[in-house]
Image: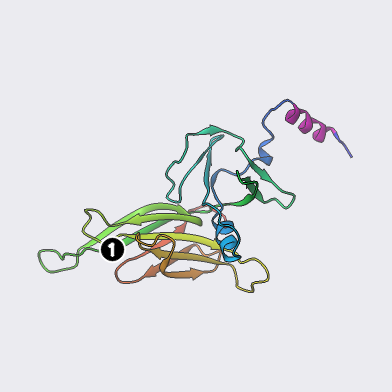
């Protein structure tokens, strides 16, 4: 077997050069949403939520709404490594590590009836489209403040239950209120490969569609 590709990689790493792109995490959003959730389910020490955005050879930390929590930095992502099974992990300050999963982008719309009706007595609805999130715990919100409508939050997860659970993997859309950000007031689910998932609770409705070209 020709050992030259392996020797070339070893040479690059030895001089501190960036590894080939094939060894880099894909562009987009990465979070530990699933690892954090199932770690809590096992009763183990809680993990803080961690999100990373990668774009154009740089990366930064972000929150669940996609807002920046750090400045852009050059790749590779500090502390992020891939194991032999192709899974990506982030080293933590307490010596543990947490698994990061790549989010599939979705675009959502939301509609919430306002508290006050229109002058003619008909319903007045607050609407927003083209809301961007991903299926690794990404969130979008509408309402509240001076909008005249209650605030609602959508969160999307691609849930894969670890063994020995017999639950089937599911794409899940959660509706959350801001006073209890970790507790869903309702949710709907679909096949993990579904292109669209929606919900209608009367006081809020909407749906999220997998972005064109995004693989299931």
Residue 182 visible in image? yes
211 and 6: which is toward the camera: 6
Residue at the outermost top position:
15
Residue at the outermost left position:
119
Q: How is the image coloured?
A: rainbow
Q: Which residues are magenta?
A: 4-14
Q: Position of residue 98 (x, y in %)?
A: 62, 51
Instruction: Kindly indicate the quadrant of the structure image that contains residue 43.
Output: bottom right
Residue at the outermost right position:
1
Q: Is residue 28 left or right of residue 179?
A: right
151 and 29: which is toward the camera: 151
Q: Position of residue 209 (x, y in %)?
A: 45, 59
Q: Residue at x 56, y 53 (%)?
A: 32
Q: Is residue 32 above or below residue 158?
A: above
The quarter of the image holding the N terminus is top right
190 and 146: which is toward the camera: 146
Q: Main secondary structure of the magenta part?
A: helix
Which secondary structure lies at badge 1?
strand
Neighbourhood count class around disc 1 (C-alpha, 10 Å): few under 14, some 14–19, many 20 upward: many
Q: Residue at x 60, y 71 (%)?
A: 168
Q: Position of residue 188 (x, y in %)?
A: 45, 70
Q: Residue at x 44, y 59 (%)?
A: 155
Q: Is residue 206 left or right of residue 94?
A: left
The quarter of the image holding the C terminus is bottom right
Q: Is residue 216 above or below residue 58?
A: below
Residue 106 visible in image? no
Instruction: Kindly indicate the quadrant of the structure image that contains residue 56.
Output: top right
191 and 65: which is toward the camera: 65
Identify the residue position indicated by label 1 in the image.
112
Q: Position of residue 85 (x, y in %)?
A: 73, 53
Q: Residue at x 23, y 55 (%)?
A: 147
């Amino acid at each position: 077997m020709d050992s030259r590709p392996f020797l070339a990689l070893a040479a690059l790493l030895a001089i501190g050069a960036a590894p080939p792109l094939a060894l880099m995490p894909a562009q987009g959003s990465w979070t530990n949403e699933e690892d954090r959730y199932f770690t809590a389910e096992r009763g183990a020490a809680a993990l803080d939520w961690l999100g990373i955005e990668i774009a154009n050879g740089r990366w930064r930390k972000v929150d669940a709404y996609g807002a920046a929590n750090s400045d852009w930095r050059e790749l590779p992502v500090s502390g992020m490594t891939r194991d032999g099974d192709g899974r990506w992990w982030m080293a933590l300050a307490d010596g543990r590590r947490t698994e990061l999963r790549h989010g599939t982008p979705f675009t959502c719309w939301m509609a919430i009836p306002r508290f006050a009706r229109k002058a003619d007595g008909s319903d007045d609805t607050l609407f927003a489209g083209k809301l961007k999130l991903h299926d690794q715990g990404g969130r979008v919100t509408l309402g509240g403040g001076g909008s005249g409508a209650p605030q609602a939050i959508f969160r999307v997860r691609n849930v894969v239950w670890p063994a020995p659970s017999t639950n089937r993997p599911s794409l899940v859309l959660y509706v959350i209120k801001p006073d209890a950000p970790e507790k869903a007031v309702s949710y709907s689910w679909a096949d993990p490969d579904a292109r669209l998932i929606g919900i209608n609770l009367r006081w809020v409705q909407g749906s999220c569609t997998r972005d064109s070209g995004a693989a299931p």
